[in-house]
């Protein structure tokens, strides 16, 4: 009997899936029950549909979520359509995306209690002209991440803005094929962070008033490790002088105020053609993971890091480092722009090459996890960059950029 | 566990003997009213369309619908939960070790959330998980004020309830997507409750027809004071946290794995640093600091109700004092 009932159902599903998909547009206006109306549209959307947010402020009492593939959420502009989470009562983020092929564009998320927009296991995603702002400025009570794609492949973040994140403004974690470009990250602890990820391009961003500008990290004890193949170029990284306001316990809480571009435990990182001004601890820092760890799969050392030509000021004029006064005297008033911890790892040779016109210094540490107490600072003496490398396969696919043309 | 829970447990065993779908008792089965068509397709607008209940407001199940309980339940602001499983005619549950029971296509899991005792009891929502040809689907139904019917609530909603502790809270009925946040595993929706390790051996024997190895090993929550601290705490974490905090699930990127079977202390939080905790860290360095619950992020987040800090992220407006106590006691007793 049950069979008789199931068969027509399966036939109906088969028919439905072969029928042409007609994309529909669902427009949602601000006002009463905006939360319910918008969430309903997100749940009932069919693949290919577009959810349009009219101009205005949308009061959100709970987090939103999208779990349908190939949906676009489009507002009237990052200052026109604002999802306001000031009164949020639940959920860990403002908007959660868990489906593939999604495009988020032209709207803002303000004052989410946790993260701003998180996309997890959401491949082929575009964030274009979206804004996440904690309007009270840098505060430890702000949420952790502004834009937060994680465990995903093929990610384009373009023309977006994040400020106020108590961890990283734009954070891409445990992902691959990533482009973060033309975006603005200000007043966060970390402006842009690429963590435990591969094949990433970070270019043409404006990164200012953070504690640290652009971080390329690899951390232990995570499902995805082995970060590498990261190109950081043509960014303006200036005035990252905000005191660290991250809650203790998070890795970024250890980032020193005044860090420009920081590489920790990655391989094959290329830093070129950036403009680095007023990052008074270290315009460029290359170090091993400094903490204890027990994960046998984890490599704490940076490998094959290239600092090619960058426009850099005189360097660390006001470093937030133990013994700063003596160091400044020793180095003639400013620490040279490139700081390395001196750890060579299994390779036995320095993990970085630096353009001959850019000076550096080393802590000359001899053991991972040793800390500043073991430092014997000295000028940096490493080789110059070799030939150009191939970035074939790095960054988001061209089809993502085509979506926002 | 409240008296209601114990009564329910007794009812389960009684019903399990009388109404449960069991091949041996097939001849005595009453007429079935459950709509297999509603389970298999569409978005039924009301709970009544499924026909799961002989008396829905009274939560008396129809033929083929069997109540069950869990040894250690998931905390939901102190809601009383009434759990049922439906199996299509002639189909049966199978067990494969201590993990999830295997449900044939056409099965349904039904869970009603209620607050208040006796005549004051009010049904808030009934969540159904339907095992369809293409996989499991979750649908939330919200009870009306008159308690006569529950209507499909794809977007969930909020409603005021008074918890058993007497606190008035804004209770969140999850939306369809939020169902998946907890029930999602490797991209698919799966049941999370009915693992044989967390179910009564007598029920399994009566309904499944066997008691697999490892079944009924999680302590009963009402007996937690007599259970070893570690067993009570690990059972609590398995049931309340591990549907997200495990590989392939919503919180997989945290690297924290709170499943009962996880034996690596760092994987379940001991001296494990946070990854994406943000202000959820509360200024602490590790998930669990042996001997020091107050310095443990796990305790800090369980003790919070603030979005962005509070764990679990969903289905929690109040702190589970009993659960927190069990976890804190376990951490307290760990060798430093």
Image (cartoon, rainbow, N blue to C red):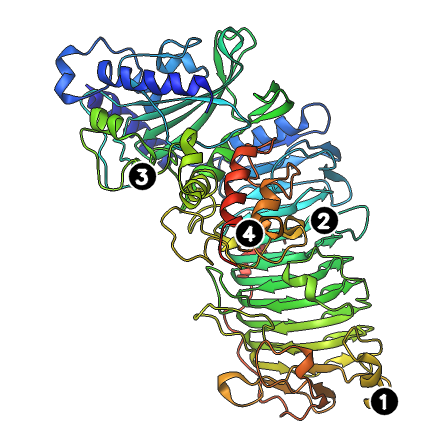
Query: Can marks 3 and 1 be said to lie on one chain?
Result: no
- Depth check: B110 or A74 in front? B110
| Disc 4 and disc 3 in contact, CB within 8 angstroms | no
Residue A272 visible from this viewpoint? no
Q: Which residue is mark 3?
A: B217
Describe the element under mark 2 as helix, strand or loop.
Answer: strand
Q: Residues within 10 Å of mark 4 (few under 14, many from 20)?
A: many
| Disc 2 and disc 1 in contact, CB within 8 angstroms | no
Describe the element under mark 1 as helix, strand or loop.
Answer: loop
Q: Residues within 10 Å of mark 3 (few under 14, many from 20)?
A: some
Query: Can marks 2 and 1 be said to lie on one chain?
Result: yes
Nearer to us of marks 4 and 3 is 3
When the figure is inspected, residue A66 is found, relative to residue A169, above or below; the finding is: above
For image coordinates 28% across by 41% down, the residue present is B98
Nearer to us of marks 3 and 1 is 3
Nearer to us of marks 2 and 1 is 1
Tell which subunit mark 2 falls on: A
User: Which label number is shown at residue B87?
Assistant: none
Q: Which residue is mark 4?
A: A125
| Disc 3 and disc 1 in contact, CB within 8 angstroms | no
Left or right for B171, reference A317: left
């Amino acid at each position: 009997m049950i069979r008789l009932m199931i068969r027509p159902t399966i036939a109906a599903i088969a028919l439905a899936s072969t029928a042409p998909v007609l994309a529909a547009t669902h427009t949602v206006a601000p006002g009463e029950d905006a939360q319910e109306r918008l969430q309903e549209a997100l749940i009932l959307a069919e693949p290919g549909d577009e959810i349009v947010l009219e101009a205005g402020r949308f009061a959100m009492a709970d987090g939103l979520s999208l779990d349908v593939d190939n949906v676009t959420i489009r507002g009237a502009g990052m200052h026109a359509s604002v999802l306001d989470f000031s009164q949020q009562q639940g959920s860990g983020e403002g908007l959660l995306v868990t489906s593939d092929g999604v495009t988020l564009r032209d709207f803002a998320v303000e004052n989410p209690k946790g993260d701003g927009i998180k996309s997890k296991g959401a491949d082929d995603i575009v964030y274009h002209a979206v804004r996440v702002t904690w309007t009270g400025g840098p505060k430890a009570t702000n949420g952790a991440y502004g834009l937060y794609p994680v465990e995903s492949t093929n990610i384009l973040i373009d023309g977006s803005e994040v400020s106020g994140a108590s961890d990283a403004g734009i954070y891409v974690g445990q992902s691959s094929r990533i482009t973060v470009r033309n975006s603005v990250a200000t007043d966060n602890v970390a402006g842009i962070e690429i963590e435990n990820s591969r094949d990433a391009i970070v270019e043409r961003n404006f990164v200012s008033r953070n504690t640290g500008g652009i971080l390329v990290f690899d951390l232990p004890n995570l499902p995805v490790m082995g970060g590498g193949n990261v190109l950081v170029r043509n960014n303006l990284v200036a005035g990252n002088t905000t005191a660290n306001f991250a809650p203790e316990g998070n890795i970024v809480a250890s980032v020193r105020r005044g860090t420009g571009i920081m590489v920790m435990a990655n391989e094959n990182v290329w830093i070129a053609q950036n403009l680095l001004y007023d990052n008074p601890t270290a315009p460029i820092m290359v170090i091993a993971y400094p903490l204890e760890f027990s994960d046998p799969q984890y490599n704490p050392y940076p490998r094959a890091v290239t600092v090619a030509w960058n426009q850099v000021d005189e360097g660390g004029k006001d470093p937030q480092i133990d013994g700063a006064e003596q160091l400044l005297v020793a180095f003639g008033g400013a620490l040279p722009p490139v700081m390395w911890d001196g750890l060579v790892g299994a390779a036995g040779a320095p993990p970085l090459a630096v353009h001959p016109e850019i000076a550096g210094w080393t802590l000359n540490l001899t053991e991972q996890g040793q800390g500043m107490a073991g430092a014997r600072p000295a000028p940096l003496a490493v080789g110059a960059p070799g030939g150009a490398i191939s970035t074939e396969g790095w960054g988001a696919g061209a089809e993502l950029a085509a979506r926002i043309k | 566990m409240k008296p209601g829970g114990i009564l329910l447990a007794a009812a389960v065993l009684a019903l399990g003997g009388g109404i449960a779908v069991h091949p041996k008792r097939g001849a005595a089965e009453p007429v079935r009213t459950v709509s297999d068509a509603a389970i298999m397709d569409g978005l039924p607008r009301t709970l009544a369309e499924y026909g799961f209940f002989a008396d829905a407001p009274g939560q008396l199940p129809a033929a083929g619908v069997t109540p069950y309980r869990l040894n250690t339940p998931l905390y939901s602001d102190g809601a009383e939960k009434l759990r049922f499983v439906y199996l299509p005619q002639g189909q049966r549950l199978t067990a494969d070790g201590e993990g999830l029971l295997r449900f044939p296509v056409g099965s349904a899991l039904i869970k009603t959330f209620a607050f208040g005792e006796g005549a004051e009891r009010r049904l808030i929502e009934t969540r159904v998980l339907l095992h369809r040809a293409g996989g499991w689907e979750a649908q939330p139904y919200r009870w009306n004020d008159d308690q006569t019917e529950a209507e499909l609530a794809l977007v969930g909603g909020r409603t005021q309830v008074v918890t058993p502790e007497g606190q008035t809270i804004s209770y969140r009925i999850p939306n369809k997507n939020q169902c998946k946040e907890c029930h999602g595993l490797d991209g698919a929706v799966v049941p999370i409750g009915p693992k044989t390790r967390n179910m009564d051996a007598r029920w399994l024997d009566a309904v499944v027809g066997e008691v697999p190895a490892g079944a009924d090993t999680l302590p009963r929550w009402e007996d937690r004071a007599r259970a070893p601290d570690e067993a009570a705490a690990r059972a609590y974490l398995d049931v309340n946290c591990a549907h997200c905090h495990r590989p392939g699930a919503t919180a997989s990127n945290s690297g924290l794995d709170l499943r009962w079977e996880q034996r690596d202390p760092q994987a379940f939080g001991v001296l494990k640093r946070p990854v994406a905790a943000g202000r959820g860290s509360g200024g602490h360095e590790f998930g669990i600091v042996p001997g020091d619950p107050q310095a443990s992020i796990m305790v800090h987040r369980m003790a919070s109700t603030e979005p962005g800090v509070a764990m679990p992220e969903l289905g929690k407006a109040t702190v589970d004092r009993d659960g927190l106590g069990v976890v804190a006691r376990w951490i307290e007793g760990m060798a430093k």
